[in-house]
Amino acid sequence: MCGIVGVSGIDRAAEVAFLGLYALQHRGQESAGISAVHDGRVTVHKAHGGVADGFNDAKLQSLPGRVALGHTRYSTAGGRGLINSQPISVRYHQGDLALVHNGNLTNAHTLRDDLVAEGALFQSTVDTEVIVHLIARSRERTVDAQVRDALSRLTGAFSVIITVGETMYAARDPWGFRPLVLGRKKSGWILASETCALDLIGAQFEAALEPGDIIKIENGSVEYLEALQRAERPAPCIFELIYFARPDSHVWGVSVDRARRAFGRQLAREHAVEADCVFSVPDSSNSAALGYAEESGVPFELGLIRNHYVGRTFIHPSQAGRDFRVRIKYNAVREVINGKRVIVVDDSLVRGTTSRGLIRLIREAGAKEVHFRVASPPVISPCYYGIDMPTREELIGANHSVEEIRAHLNVDSLGYLSMQGMHDAVAKHGPFCDACFSGNYPAPLVDIQRGKPAASHC
Ligand code: SF4
């Protein structure tokens, strides 16, 4: 998963992109990059880690111009080197081109093999570079048509922002898997993965790009180009609402906080239990736990505290004992838990390893009963559209019954939100992709069907 930002027509655009990335930091901390266009030339700076680690005043001043792109990367797939980070930039026959991408193409290896057979030379191992080659090799005459031609050959998930010279393009795939919104700041324009980035920048929300939309921003005007052929059924990712997006964002036309509360309320209706308090696994489950408490009448408490200052490199191998990773991130509040029947709400259950460690913490803090509630259905299939998930073998919900998982977690009861309940809770804003819960993949898995590896990106 990644976060992307585009800034057009604003002085010191790189600084604005930096702020946007700051708001989108939850979408990726592996690396951050900003490109800026000045006199038609692109300058790029990329660095490992979060955006605050990689950029300072001097770096931002070395990126002059009124047009900029930003990218924050989550995935470690495709290799960690900065060569695999974004923005990707090349000099092509129509000018300097830079590109940022959020999503995962499902035909990237197929396209790449074709391009290599035609003589293309690739610098990175990420699928995004395919898009750059397709634009550069398009036989269409205008840049608008070359961009559209390239995007129309892609299958899978992509929200992209591209600059060619000072002209900016933005597009979403025909299914609309990943979000992309357009905002306005005075006479300039901002594109971002989530509305929380617009809020931080001080931009007004103008529109969410629809599946298949392609827009062009030039000289302060926004133009909608001929859209890509839309999928019969749109498939925005429901996992953005469950876990990924920030609760203060609006995604798919709904407040993420309100969607999560609706999941929590539905969960309470489906899996009620007598208890003394309900609490969340912070932070992504806070809204769902509040919804559960509102519906059930069971008091909401802060039973687990999360340490926000855990760096990725903090854990020394000698400390990597059982549950150490969980303990360094969470602690249980004994005063809330001791002697109580508690309901713990988590947004999703993927591998189950963190949850098992957490339950142990909660039991050690003196819980009399532990009832675990999951505000989404069992995850049974990997995501091939841009959310980093383990293989099917590692997904606890794919390989074990609910009773087996309950016993494994060592909880008194376990309840998942039903598939119907999940869809009902946000029905006004669907339909959605639910492939990781259902195994029904809306966009063809071209590479996998051809025996090639799944694309690796974000
Ligand atoms: Fe989202 Fe799951 Fe679909 Fe991936 S498979 S796009 S995580 S709903």
Image: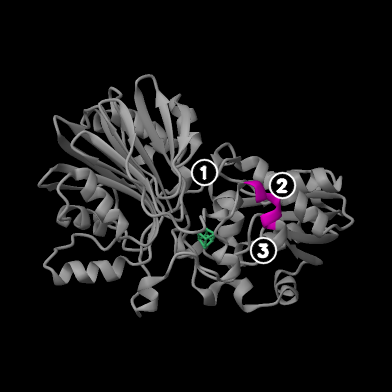
* Magenta span includes 424: yes
**Foreground of the two, 198 or 149:** 149
In whole angstroms, how far apart are the C-alphas of marks 1 and 3? 30 Å
Instruction: Return the disc, 2 or 3, that comes first in the chain's sequence.
Output: 2
Determine whether 62 is above or below 84 in the image: above
Q: Amino acid at mark 2?
A: Ala
Contact between labelled residues 1 and 2, with CB atoms less than 8 Å apart: no
Q: Is mark 3 within 8 Å of ligand 1?
A: no
Residue 279 in the figure: left or right of residue 144: right
Residue 152: image tag: none
Query: What's the CA distance linking mark 2 and mark 3?
Result: 14 Å
Q: Which residue is mark 1?
A: 309
Magenta part of the protein: which range? 422-428
- Residue in the picture at 33% in, 31% down: 222
Question: In the image, is the residue at mark 1 within 8 Å of ligand 1 by its beta carbon?
Answer: no
The residue drawn where x is 55% and y is 69% is 440
Q: Is residue 133 above or below residue 66?
A: below
Query: In the image, is 304 to the left or to the right of 242?
Result: right
- Nearer to me, 304 or 351: 351
Mark 3 element type? loop
Residue at screen point 82% across, 67% down: 412
- Residue 438: name its quadrant: bottom right
Amino acid carrying mark 3 in the image: Pro
Which label is found at residue 377?
Answer: 3
Locate the N terminus and report the quarter of the image it occupies: bottom left
Residue 237 x %, y %? 53, 55
Q: Residue 12: x percent and y percent?
A: 28, 25
Residue at disc 2, CB closer than 8 Å to ligand 1: no
Residue 296 sits inside the magenta stretch: no
The local crowd at label 2, few if under 14, some if 14 to 19, many if 20 or more residues have their Cα within 10 Å, is many
As drawn, the label of residue 262 is 2
